[in-house]
Amino acid sequence: MKAVFMACNQSMYDAVIDIMKELNISGFTGWEELIGKGSNTGEPHLGNHAWPTMNSALISIMEDAKADEFLQRLKQLDNENHKQGLRAFAWSVTDAI
């Protein structure tokens, strides 16, 4: 099992949810309004008058193969919308109840 955490420009959140539906990933916890800034070249998304854009994020636990496919689809979405900003990370889940 893997945990996949994804943060993106708020404008991309629905596209991420659509990918999850297509891959039959149903369980997740999401945050629709977050602030943040990319570590490389990203502009701040702070929800204020100077930087009004916001981020969204989610985390989902899934089988390894599903996580790999999800990450590939997220990378494709990021490549198609590079200036919007999307980052995803996965790590192994060793215990769950």
Image (cartoon, grey):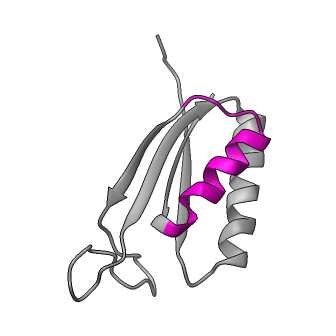
- Is residue 44 left or right of 1 when viewed as pictured? left
50 vs 8: above or below = below
How far across and how far down the image is residue 94, in percent?
A: 52, 23
Q: Is 19 one of the magenta-colored residues?
A: yes
Q: Is 32 one of the magenta-colored residues?
A: no
The residue that appears at 72% across and 77% down in the rendered structure is 80
The residue that appears at 46% across and 10% down in the rendered structure is 97
The N terminus appears in which quarter of the rendering? top right
The residue that appears at 45% across and 87% down in the rendered structure is 41
69 vs 55: above or below = above
40 vs 64: above or below = below
How far across and how far down the image is residue 4, in percent?
A: 56, 43
Q: How many marks?
A: 0
Nearer to me, 11 or 62? 11
The magenta segment is 11-27
Q: Determine the main secondary structure of the stretch shown in magenta.
A: helix
9 vs 4: above or below = below
How far across and how far down the image is residue 64, in percent?
A: 71, 34
Q: Residue furthest left?
A: 49
Nearer to me, 38 or 23? 23
Nearer to me, 80 or 71? 80
